[in-house]
């Protein structure tokens, strides 16, 4: 079941259809997603009425991006509870739908924990508790997003006091992946609103084109001056002195400050270091995973070859049957990251204590555990 909306030209940053919403009966219970595989051509709602449908949506990237995966995971648990399904089994299935973004397990664990804690009061009360927790995860992400935008804007001001920022970004980190305005793109949007953004360089982000399809869509709707480039063109852009800062999001930040993000982020960090350009990661504390000690320990999702050998699953760009290497993410070592912007402040990733301290002082720190998957 899907409802289709033409994409209007409104100049607003966020899509008309929210990236995710909860539907009560009679429409639901359901988790209703903006199907990101159909953007930018159309805003289509994808109605997930059970957990297997939601897991499929997560695996096919109809819903994607670390913070939104956490929110989706939490509502998925609420959905299982509202349907009277086996909640621990559903939670396991959701938490393992994709391996790299730690937020997914974080959101699942929060809602499952609330459900478990209220189970003595009966199934209806436990289901209500899971839904309330999912709503809290959603609202906290919106708040974190606003805080990251403020901290990130202040950092940009320090890096280049006169404004006029030319920022390169990779993948998609805006309202499409968040309860609020996103992570890195929320900072860019704040700079744009202040008149301080000279240009947003948008890496197309092969193979699934989250930059060209989604970031360009959000940037255009917000009226930002933006330009899409092929990922391989970034080097000549740095060489021409056209980049003042790189801003990206993250899927998991290990205790040693290494950052897993969309494949292609690490080469940008190397380029940025070579050209003396700040490389800044913007991510909520729910993306920091103190239980993963080193970057090398981060599980990097490997995706089907067809995503590389075909465009949009239809247009072949390699000989039939060509083998392909298709990791969804890469890991940037801490020493290449200038700063990590979180909702609690800005920290240098090589400062392990600083990162750990930010996590422990977070109001979320007590509900964190393990590698973000099911804990208890
Ligand atoms: C705020 S989103 C940060 C990351 O989740 C984002 O950059 C990214 O890599 C998303 O990957 P995706 O495979 O599209 O889910």
Image (cartoon, rainbow, N blue to C red):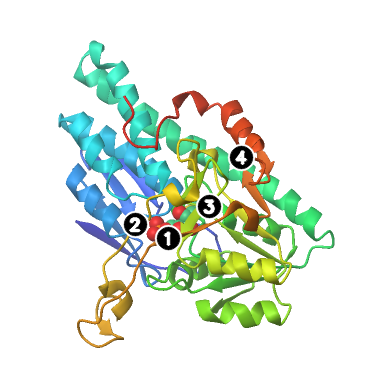
Q: Is residue 140 left or right of residue 313?
A: right
Check mark 1 vs ligand 1: CB closer than 8 Å? yes or no: yes
Instruction: Give the secondary structure at mark 2.
Output: loop
Quick one: label 3 or label 1, which is nearer the N terminus?
A: 3
Residue 311 horizontal/vertical position (percent): 32, 79
How busy is the neighbourhood of tag 4: few (under 14 within 10 Å), some, or many (20 plus)? many
For the N terminus, which image quadrant? bottom left
The span from disc 2 to disc 4 (Cα, nearest Å) is 27 Å
Secondary-structure class at tag 3: strand
Q: 59 and 71: which one is in front?
A: 59
Q: First in sequence, mark 4 or 1: give its number.
A: 1
Q: Earlier in the sequence, mark 4 or mark 3?
A: 3
Q: Which residue is under mark 2?
A: 301
Q: Which mark is residue 259?
A: 3
Q: Residue at x 68, y 46 (%)?
A: 348
Mark 2 CB lies closer than 8 A to ligand 1: yes
User: If you read the primary sequence from the N terminus, does the residue marked by circle 2 or circle 1 appear first?
Assistant: 2
Does residue 27 sit above or below 266 in this rendering? above
Q: Which residue is mark 1?
A: 329
For label 4, the SS is: loop
Which class describes the residues within 10 Å of circle 3: few (<14), some (14-19), or many (20+)? many
Q: Residue at x 23, y 58 (%)?
A: 2
Residue neighbourhood size for the residue with mark 2, other residues' Cα within 10 Å, grouped as few (<14), some (14–19), many (≥20): some
Within 10 Å of the Cα at label 1, are there few (<14), some (14-19), or many (20+) other Cα atoms?
many
Residue at image point 21% right, 36% down: 90
Q: Quadrant of ligand 1?
A: bottom left
Please give the label number shown on residue 343: 4
Residue drawn 45% across the image and 40% down it: 292
Q: Is residue 129 visible?
A: no
């Amino acid at each position: 079941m899907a409802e289709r909306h033409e994409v209007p030209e409104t100049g607003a940053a966020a899509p008309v259809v929210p990236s995710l919403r909860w539907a009560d009966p009679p429409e639901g219970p359901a988790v209703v997603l903006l199907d990101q595989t159909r953007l930018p051509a159309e805003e289509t709602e994808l109605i997930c009425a059970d957990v297997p449908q939601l897991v499929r949506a997560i695996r096919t990237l109809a819903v994607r991006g670390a913070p939104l995966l956490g929110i989706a995971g939490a509502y998925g648990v609420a959905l299982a509870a509202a349907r009277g399904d086996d909640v621990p089994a559903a939670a396991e299935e959701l938490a393992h739908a994709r391996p790299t973004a730690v937020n997914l397990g974080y959101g699942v664990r929060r809602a499952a924990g609330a459900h478990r804690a209220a189970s003595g009061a009966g199934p209806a009360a436990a289901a209500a508790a899971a839904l309330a927790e999912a709503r809290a995860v959603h609202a906290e992400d919106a708040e974190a997003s606003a805080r990251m935008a403020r901290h990130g804007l202040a950092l940009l001001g320090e890096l280049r006091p006169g404004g006029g920022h030319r920022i390169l970004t990779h993948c998609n980190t805006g309202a499409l992946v968040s309860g609020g305005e996103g992570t890195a793109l929320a900072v860019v949007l704040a700079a744009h609103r202040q008149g301080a953004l000279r240009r947003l360089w948008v890496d197309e982000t092969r193979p699934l084109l989250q930059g060209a399809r989604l970031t360009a869509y959000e940037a255009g709707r917000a009226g930002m001056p933006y330009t899409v480039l092929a990922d391989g063109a970034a080097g000549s852009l740095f060489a021409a002195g056209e980049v003042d800062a790189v801003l990206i999001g993250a899927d998991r930040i290990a205790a040693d400050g290494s950052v897993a993000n969309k494949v292609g982020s690490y080469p940008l960090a190397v380029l940025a270091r070579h050209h003396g350009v700040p490389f800044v990661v913007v991510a909520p504390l729910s993306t920091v995973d103190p239980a993963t000690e080193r970057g090398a320990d981060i599980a990097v999702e490997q995706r089907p070859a067809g995503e590389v050998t075909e465009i949009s699953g239809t247009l072949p760009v390699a000989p039939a049957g060509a083998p392909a290497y298709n990791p969804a993410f890469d890991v940037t070592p801490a020493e290449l990251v200038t700063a990590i912007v979180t909702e609690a402040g800005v920290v240098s990733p090589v400062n392990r204590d600083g990162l750990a301290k930010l996590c422990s002082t977070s109001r979320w720190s007590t509900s964190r555990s393990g590698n973000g998957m099911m804990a208890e």
